[in-house]
Image (tube, rainbow, N blue to C red):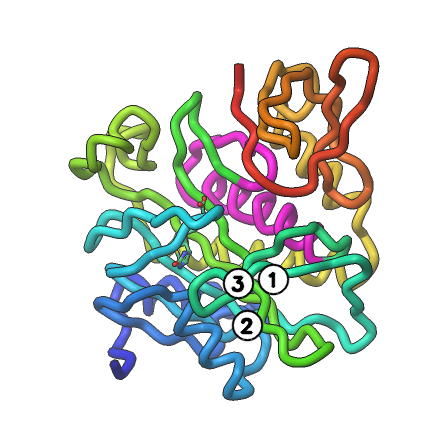
Amino acid sequence: MPAETLPPDVRDALEASRADRGAFGEPLYFYPAIGSTNDAAARLAEAGAPEGTTVVAEEQTAGRGRSGRSWFSAPGAGLYVSVIIRPDAASTVPGGSFRKMGSGTEFHILPSEIGLLTLAAGVALATAVREATGLQPNIKWPNDLLCGHRKLAGILAEASATGAGLDAIVVGFGINVRQVAYPADLADRATSIEAELGRPIDRGLLLARALARLSAVREALRRGETAAVLDQWRRLAPSAAGRPVSWTGTAGERRGITAGIDQDGALLVDTDGARERIIAGEVIWR
Ligand code: BTN
């Protein structure tokens, strides 16, 4: 499906933010409806599209979430965006492995640079939501944005790997913008920016801030400012320390108290007498 002309609100906000965004959003492909923006971005990456290339859709008919879930992507309800990031030539994936998800590849193990990028994307998105709307979502490990217990936004980072090399990372994010009738299984768990604020927001500005913040954290990681990005993440994620959680380990359900993240972005959890390191999957707040 060919990309279409940008809606005026998105076009104006992108023009106004050109200096803040670096290469992010350049070029930007806009689709009224598409299967998954992550798939479209992965195809562009395979065809050689540069870092910063962005795909935005008004609706996704096959939006994907983490862990094989679908992502509710009704027309006009949210922002559905995917951005191509090119790993540095020197990047390796020590101990990393990937799990095929649809046409992309979801990170199964958090190899340090990629894991850090997914946390950094959470920092970027949380900051962008605050800047564009005044709302202050918290991050739930690894990178869900929540208001209270309800999910506002999610991030799906997928790798495009050919042979031994990691060619591209597609960072896809979905932000619930407008209050809509959610499917029954989401009704108690999802929220939107406009439901939280009780007023309409400028989604073009939100997109522009998200691209600007993604560009900023990408450059920070490239400059080696990992510790600063992780500190930002910790400030935005109060539940990462001192919160009772459960998760499914190899031996079934485990419970413990969160004890922060390590330098690779893994979640630390204190259980009976031991500290565990969670590198993938879902934790449930207790
Ligand atoms: C999650 O499960 O929290 C991650 C949700 C990610 C959804 C976004 S919407 C844009 C991009 N395209 C997709 O198919 N998924 C991501």
Residue at the extreme left of the image, as rendered: 181
| Magenta stretch: includes residue 130 | yes
User: Which residue appears at 77% of the width and 64% of the height?
Assistant: 93
* Pointer 1 or 3: first along the chain: 3
Front position in the image: 173 or 128: 173
Which amino acid type is shown beneath numbered disc 1? Ser
Which amino acid type is shown beneath numbered disc 3? Lys
Q: Which residue is mark 1?
A: 215
Label 1 to label 3: alpha-carbon separation:
27 Å
Residue at the extreme top of the image, as rendered: 272
On the question of residue 69 being in view, the answer is yes
Q: Main secondary structure of the magenta part?
A: helix
Q: Which residue is mark 2?
A: 52
User: Which residue appears at 60% of the width and 35% of the height?
Assistant: 141
Mark 3 secondary-structure assignment: strand
* Pointer 1 or 2: first along the chain: 2
Front position in the image: 231 or 185: 185
Mark 1 sits near ligand 1, with its Cβ under 8 Å away: no
Q: Is residue 213 left or right of residue 180?
A: right
Front position in the image: 206 or 271: 271
- Quarter of the image for residue 196 reads top left
State the mark number for residue 100: 3
Q: Is residue 254 left or right of residue 285?
A: right
Residue 74 x, y percent position in the rendering? 21, 51
Residues rendered magenta in the picture: 114-143
Question: Which quarter of the rendering shows the N terminus?
Answer: bottom left
Q: Are marks 1 and 2 in contact (CB under 8 Å)?
A: yes
Which amino acid type is shown beneath numbered disc 2? Gly
Q: Neighbour class for label 3 at 10 Å: few (<14), some, many (≥20)?
A: few
User: Which residue appears at 78% of the width and 45% of the height?
Assistant: 264
